[in-house]
Amino acid sequence: MSEELNVLPDIEQLALKIDALLPQTQCSQCGYAGCKPYARAIAAGEANINQCPPGGDAGIRKLAALLGRPCLPLNPAHGVEKPQGLAFIDENYCIGCTLCIQACPVDAIVGAAKQMHTIVANLCTGCELCIPPCPVDCISMRPPIGTHPHDADSARERHEFRLFREEREQQEKATRLAAKVAAQTRSATAQQGDETDSANRTTAEDRKKALIAAAIARAQLQKSQVKPANTRQLSPEQLAQIAEIEARRSAEDKSK
């Protein structure tokens, strides 16, 4: 464990030195998501030094000298070396979809939804990542303005700030989503509690009504079963008359 703790800082320090020699186009032609991930892969022995077309042969020689490795020709699987280009947006065809803005790794494109976008020439690294997502093919590569290439250190800073901003936006989005879910959960719980209380009240009222109805039924049954104590001395005709009166009274009670 202690050996790993000693080795990891050395790899990270080496990765920083390698990253300082890379062109910082952030084009991902090397197979990694930027120059720094590629530098870490080289430092860890997971990638070779000849996978960066923008750096070309000169970049390979610098990396070989730093690492004490032999020079290698550029691996054609990652592209070919060519002069740095500058992205250009044809304003006659731009529809303002913002897809190129989302693709640019160094925030070199300005614009807004449904408005024309523009390349900031001195910030463009020529990575060409903005070309594939354009739905109307209005982006092309042109020779850079002037003879000075882009500032690698500035491009690195802008790329790192973009990564920081994207991570912060994701965290804020996750926080908002969590708050929304919590609010919905509280609302659902409160509604469920209200429904439970209402159901309990309804059940109590129904139980009370049922008890009252049962008491009334028992009273009516007992009333119908009670016989006058002095009927023993009555004749059959009188008893029949009384029964008829009781039946009529019972019918009247039921109709009320």
Image (cartoon, rainbow, N blue to C red):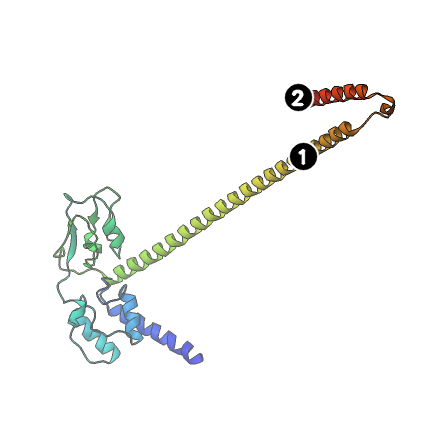
Residue type indicated by callout 2: Ser
Q: Position of residue 241 (x, y in %)?
A: 77, 18
Vertical arrangement, residue 65 with respect to residue 94, above or below: below
Looking at the image, which is closer to me, 8 or 231? 231
Residue 214 as seen in the image, left or right of residue 151: right
- Mark 1 or mark 2: name the one nearer the start of the chain: 1
How many marks are shown on the rendered structure?
2
| In this picture, residue 181 sits left or right of residue 219 | left
Measured along the vertical axis of the image, is residue 156 above or below residue 181? below
| Residue drawn at the location 74% of the way across and 32% of the way down | 218
Q: Secondary structure at mark 1?
A: helix
Q: Which mark is residue 135?
A: none
Query: In the picture, which quadrant includes the N terminus?
Result: bottom left
Question: On screen, 32 above or below 93?
Answer: below
Q: Residue furthest front?
A: 236
Q: Is residue 171 left or right of residue 198?
A: left
Alpha-carbon span between mark 1 and mark 2:
20 Å
Res. 255 mark: 2
- Foreground mark, 1 or 2, reads 2
Task: Tell me the quarter of the picture where residue 5 sits.
Answer: bottom left
- At x 22%, y 77%, the residue is 64
Q: Of the residues shown, which amino acid type is indicated by label 1?
A: Ala
Question: Residue at 45% of width from left, 46% of height from top?
Answer: 180
Tell me if label 1 and label 2 are in contact, CB under 8 Å: no
Q: Which mark is residue 210?
A: 1
Q: Where is residue 35 drawn, in percent x and y? A: 26, 66
